[in-house]
Image (tube, rainbow, N blue to C red):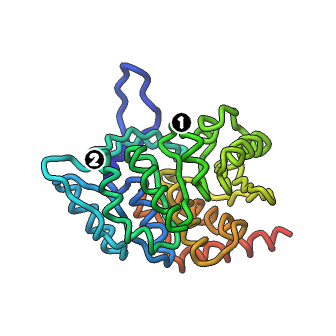
Amino acid sequence: MDMVITLNQRPHPGETVLGTHFFMNAGGKGANQAVAARKLGASVAMIGKLGSDMFAEQMLAGLEQVGVDCSAIEKVEGQKTGVAFIMLDAEGENSIIVAPGANMLLTPEDIRRQEPLIRQAKLIMVQLEIPLETVMEAIRIARRHHVPVLLDPAPAQPLSAELLSMVDYIVPNETEISQLTGIQVYDQRTAKLAAVELLRNGVSTVFAKLGEKGVVVINANSTHVIAPYKVEAIDSTAAGDAFAGALGAALVSGKDIWTAAKFASAIGALTVTRKGAQASMPDLEEAEQFIKQEAQRETGKN
């Protein structure tokens, strides 16, 4: 559950500042990506854990309302559901602290019990808000059954060459790709250098998210740069999750990586124009309308 405070200036250590607004919104990287993909037409099942508190009921209700299969989500008695505390400034930029709660109780054994669910998938999406050994087990099972793997390497942490070698698609932002490769990324050129390093570690395709500098897409055969959509950012929370969910939905629908990345970039851009995480994510009709409007605007410029 995301607890969001909007404020005009961030506090310094030891300082108290007044916020301007507070709201709560269902979040969590895995859940956000599940909702994003589902709202864009993909069939989605989620594996995860919740606590036994009021947040658990709200989270499940939100997922079920959009049609996510929640049969593999367990509630753990006596545990707290994961929460995030988000500071959102006047420019729409956020700082986030996560208390994972029941997320950290998702074990490799839990994943093994869900092998039939993974086996029938067209794609598995994993994030790092659960234990790393659990992520590894999910990826191993997916590989065993020739199911492509999309990894969102967030929150940023070091990853082994063994894990990276089993990843088909990775969607790091500037901070995450810098930490994964040791190459400081701040523009398209440095993103390409870092992406090549990930390819050397066995990743098949890298989607380096550079915010207002666009997205660099690179694999062994080609390099593409997706120009950013120009929008007025209100809240950047879950923009990366919207991108990942949209990318997953596009890939399983048969789009090539270039088309899928352009579509996902549009979904991420549209998401930042609204407040909240899951609440800000567009459905397919809204997405297509936005893409059409942007195309007409660009044509008008030319």
Mark 2 packing: few (<14 Cα in 10 Å), some, or many (20+)?
some
Q: Compare marks 1 and 2 and give the one earlier in the sequence.
A: 2
Mark 1 packing: few (<14 Cα in 10 Å), some, or many (20+)?
few
Q: Is residue 272 left or right of residue 99?
A: right
Disc 1 target residue: 158
Quarter of the rendering containing residue 56? bottom left
Question: Which residue is pictured at 78% across the width and 69% down the height?
Answer: 298
Residue 204 at x, y = what percent?
Answer: 67, 56
Classify the position of the C terminus by image quarter.
bottom right
Q: Is residue 47 above or below residue 20?
A: below
Residue 95's disc number: none
Disc 2 target residue: 105
Query: Are the two marked residues, 1 and 2, in contact with CB atoms closer than 8 angstroms?
Result: no
Q: CA distance from mark 1 to mark 2?
A: 21 Å
Instruction: Decide which of 302, 70 is in the foreground and name it.
Output: 70
Question: Which residue is pictured at 67% across the width and 49% down the height?
Answer: 212
Instruction: Decide which of 145, 235 is in the foreground and name it.
Output: 145
Residue 300 at x, y = what percent?
Answer: 80, 73
Q: Is residue 266 visible?
A: yes
